[in-house]
Amino acid sequence: MRRHDVAIIGAGAAGLSAALVLARACRDVVVLDAGHPRNAPAAHMHGFLSRDGMAPADLLGTGRSEVRGYGGVVVDTTVTGIRPDPAGGFRLTLTDGRPDVPARHVLVTTGLRDELPAVPGLRERWGRDVLHCPYCHGHEVRGRRLGVLGGDPGSHRYAQIVRQWTDDLVHVVPPGRLTADERTALLARRVEVVEGAVDHLVVDDADHLRGLQMDDGCVVACEALFVPPRFVPHDALLTGLGCDVDDRGWVVVDGTGRTSVAGVWAAGNVVDPRAQVVTAAGAGSATAVALNADLVDDDVRTAVRDLGPHTGPTRPHNQIEEDA
């Protein structure tokens, strides 16, 4: 199998944007994707200029077509490992019996997963009326009776942000989690506070969220619920290569997406949990530009090496004209 200039792992917004830039730069690019996008449960995405309201699957389908239109290759497969290639670059191991994929550089855009509280029904309604990002979904549920499921440090601040989209908000937290100042700030903006444990979600016959059943038997009404999940990056491929991580456990990249391992890059949610679709797309594009510049440097070094020593002096242009 030929050695690609770049192997991109993950065909989300970051990976496909990078592939588009690199393919247009006449690079040999292969994109390898396992087919489990984080935003698959969402019917629409928002905040992406010119693509507002588009279905995530439509964006990714269009992106794949554009990449292929410039000669890029997109393969549905799962990468299980990356190792240095003695011949230079890296070799990627796949799960489906395909041969290893050799590449000069690797860009990892495998995203993250949302780890939700252990409340029955949350996962099933994720991306519908159980939501994470108010900037992505707040406008669609504005003015309704909304809930915020808290408990982690900082959830009161999250509730204050969600308050921007409604005057009727309830913040549900375990007992004893709020400080006096936090409680005062919530009440000052007319945010109702309910302390207790959620037993399950209440859903009506039309399959709409109607509230939270508390363990004391009470039902807290809400039409949509915002839940700040724990972000867990899909970074096993990066950490397996020995990429540096920060004190939070996230892989470290510089401003261009370069990791601590030469030739290995990362972009999107795998290194930036706050990146929305448009942010991830921009990061992928910027990383592709820096990555291509790195490949050009490699190309120059190879060309100079292959040129060998000069056999004689180079005459100035004006001397050539005089001789003529």
Image: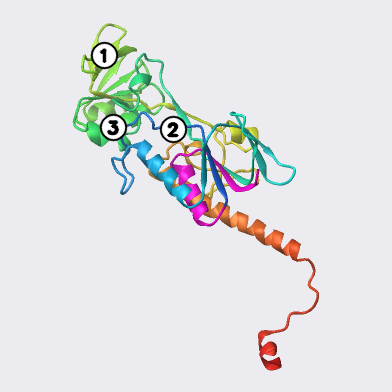
Q: Is residue 111 visible?
A: yes
Position of 233 relative to 66 (above/below): above
Query: Of callouts 2 and 3, which one flags the residue occurring earlier in the amino acid sequence?
Result: 2
**Quadrant that contains the N terminus:** top right
Amino acid of disc 2? Pro
Farthest residue, direction top: 217
| Residue matched to label 3 | 162
Looking at the rendered structure, the kind of residue marked 1 is Val
- Please rate how many residues cluster around mark 2, counting C-alpha atoms within 10 Å: few if below 14, some from 14 to 19, many from 20: some
- In terms of secondary structure, where does tag 2 sit? loop
Residue topped by disc 2: 37
- Secondary structure beneath dot 1 equals strand
Q: Which mark is residue 202?
A: 1
10 falls in the magenta region:
yes
Tell me which segment is drawn in magenta: 1-27
Q: CA distance from mark 1 to mark 2?
A: 28 Å
Q: Do labels 2 and 3 touch, CB within 8 Å?
A: no
Give coordinates of residue 281: x percent, y percent.
43, 45
| Circle 3: residue type | Val
Task: Tell me the SS state at disc 3.
Answer: helix
Q: Residue at left 57%, top 40%?
A: 252
Between residues 209 and 302, which one lies in front from this camera angle? 302
Report the side of 313 relative to 282 (left or right).
Answer: right
Q: How many marks?
A: 3
Marks 1 and 3, how far apart in space? 21 Å
